[in-house]
Amino acid sequence: MSRDSLTLVAGLLVAVHIAAASIQASEWSPGPSSQWSPGSFLQGTGAQQRAPDGVPVSATGDPQYSTFSLCAIDPDTGQSGAAVTTRVPFVGRAVPHVRAGVGAVCTQASTRVENGREGLDLLAKGIAPREALDQLLKADAQRESRQVGIINMKGETAAHTGKSNGAWAGSKQGLNYTVQANIMVGPDVVDAVAASFESTQGTSMPLAERMILALEAGQAKGGDKRWGSLQSAAIKIADPKNPGRGGDYIALAIEVGEHAEPVGEMKRIYYTTARRLGYRAFSRVEGPDVLELKRMLHALGYWKPELATFPEGQGAPAGLNRYDDETIAAVDKFRTDKSLNYQGNPPGLVDTRFIDALRAAYFAKKKGT
């Protein structure tokens, strides 16, 4: 093929690509006069349609959060919680709902998101979970495609699994919890969640941690059977003693919008941000870098300035390579003198800014001598 022919073919391919992109863009950008209707914002055709955030959506606009979830309370702290994971992104946007002093709701499968708020409203009026659930579903033409779990602050629970939920589907209730699931690898998932949550009863472990560990146990059994799909997880904890943000009384809200190991990532975020034991490995800091730090600080008059020479070799004292309180004080004094202190700095912070300033001062002194 001649060079001119190749150029013509390439130009045609580019034109086709641009035309296709223009068609796609026009589908995503309705004009000012466009009217919304169920499915008007969806991608794809046929039974499997998706919203712009990648969540499967039915023709009537209901997000499809087939999943397993846990609603629970801690009567000792007054907290209520909802935790969930699924092989669909952004599950925290729709499934878990909590309200301080009221309880928790998880609405899933063919998800009517309003069931969360409306269910909590009914609980707040003193209506028991079973009656509240009946009221939510009695006029719902899609009730057989729904799955809902509810718990109030008395520990009373109710769950509904519609006949159209994908197998395996079901629920289990116990002391201060309800777990519900659909499209699972089997009932072992729900059993594992329940067993884990029950095993931590009375341990004084925080409710959030108990719930995350319970989801982890269910995930270890296989969880949602749609392997290879995008995954997410979320947890919300309400606490009447914690005003949260803007008076919402949400003490904790973690959403892992998409991750290969969403429950593990949620656990990591919880342990790290709560500074719980286990979020990091630590030990006494010692080594040749600490020795070098002391040598530089000594030369600049910050560490043991009374010593004429830096102690090294066989005559060096034990623990010379250990980062101790005296060295931390020397570091802090150097930071103050060099205007390196910033709000929030922990004592004895040896970071890149500090090291750069220390090395510059040390080598300038050495060069001068």
Image (cartoon, grey):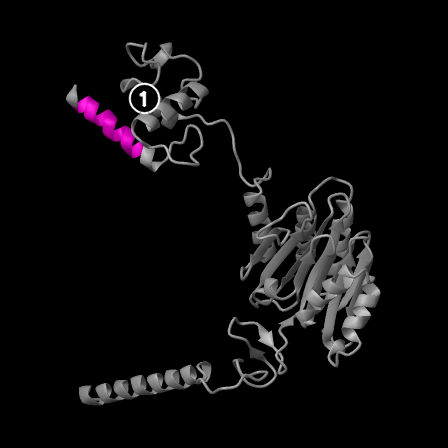
Q: Nearer the viewer, residue 354 or 141?
A: 141
Residue drawn where x is 44% and y is 14% of the image = 318
Residue drawn where x is 38% and y is 25% of the image = 332
Image position of 148 with respect to 323: above or below: below
Image position of 255 with respect to 3: above or below: above
**Residue 112 falls in which quadrant of the image?**
bottom right
- In the picture provided, is 342 more to the left or to the right than 270? left
Q: Quadrant of the C terminus?
A: top left
Q: Nearer the viewer, residue 277 or 290?
A: 277
Residue 126, x across and y down, in percent? 81, 60
Estimate how packed mark 1 is, as few (under 14), some (14 to 19) or many (20 or more) residues with alpha carbons within 10 Å. many
Name, please, the residue furthest toward the left.
Answer: 368
Residue 309 seen anywhere in this rendered image of the structure? yes
Residue drawn where x is 40% and y is 21% of the image = 329
**Residue 302 falls in which quadrant of the image?**
top left
Residue 303, x across and y down, in percent? 35, 17
Q: Nearer the viewer, residue 341 or 20?
A: 341
Check disc 1 and report its element: helix, strand or loop: helix
- How many numbered circles does the render carry? 1
Label 1 sits on residue: 297
Which secondary structure is most common in the magenta stretch? Answer: helix
Q: Which residues are magenta?
A: 355-367
Q: Amino acid at mark 1?
A: Leu
- In the picture provided, is 306 more to the left or to the right than 365? right
Residue 261 seen anywhere in this rendered image of the structure? no
